[in-house]
Amino acid sequence: MMLNVLFGLDFMMTAEQKQLCLDYWSVVDTQENYANHLHRLCQTYEVSPEQVFKTVQLSYAYLDDVTCVTCGMNCPIYLPADVSIMRSKDSWTCDHCLPVLERENRFYPLSPF
Ligand SMILES: [Zn+2]
């Protein structure tokens, strides 16, 4: 599996909340219709969409196959839609490295081609 899910704020999460997060991110692999997926989650866990989003914010997912060109960190994903966007890029630079590269590029401008 190329999408991995990690849990932040682990101590605050119940087993059911963790399962909800894994379920939520599974839409990326199954290619299920997002609206259907969300509806099913709400029914399964008997929660509102707002509660789903709040719970998902306690977890974070990252891509195994997209890494920062500078430091090699795996690309974090905040929304399922990010996956196809990030994978379509030729290269990706993480939020930590990007400001440094941008500063360097101001002093040593790189040709866009
Ligand atoms: Zn980086």
Image (cartoon, rainbow, N blue to C red):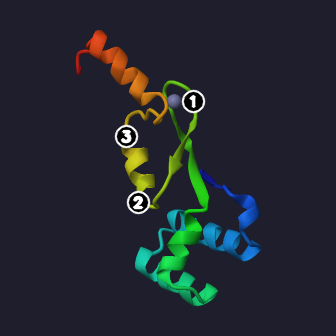
Q: Quadrant of residue 79?
A: bottom left
Rendered residue at 48%/27% (across/down): 69
Q: Residues within 10 Å of mark 2 (few under 14, many from 20)?
A: few
Residue type highlighted by circle 2:
Ala
Q: Is residue 87 left or right of residue 67?
A: left
Query: Residue at coordinates 53% horizontally, 47% vertically from top-left?
Result: 76
Secondary structure at badge 2 equals loop
Mark 1, other Cα within 10 Å: few <14 / some 14–19 / many ≥20: few
Q: Is residue 57 left or right of residue 106?
A: right
Q: Nearer the viewer, mark 3 or mark 2?
A: 2
Q: Residue at x 63, y 74 (%)?
A: 20
Q: Mark 1 sits on what residue?
A: 72
Q: Give the Cα separation between the discs numbered 3 and 2.
A: 13 Å
Circle 3 sits on which residue?
A: 89
Determine whether the residue tagged by mark 1 lies in a helix, strand or loop. Answer: loop
**What quarter of the picture does the C terminus occupy?**
top left
User: What type is the residue that disc 3 sits on?
Assistant: Lys
Label 3, secondary structure: give it. Answer: loop
Is the residue 63 above or below the residue 58 in the image? above
* Percent of width and height locating residue 14: 74, 72
Query: Under 8 Å from ligand 1: the CB of mark 3?
Result: no
Q: Which residue is mark 2?
A: 81
Count of numbered badges drawn on the protein: 3
- Is ligand 1 within 8 Å of the beta carbon of the residue shown at mark 1? yes
Image location of residue 16, percent across then percent down: 72, 76
Query: Can see residue 33?
Result: no
Is residue 73 something one can see in this rendering? yes
10 and 42: which is toward the camera: 10
Q: Which residue: 41% across, 29% down?
A: 98
Image spot of residue 75 (x, y percent):
52, 42
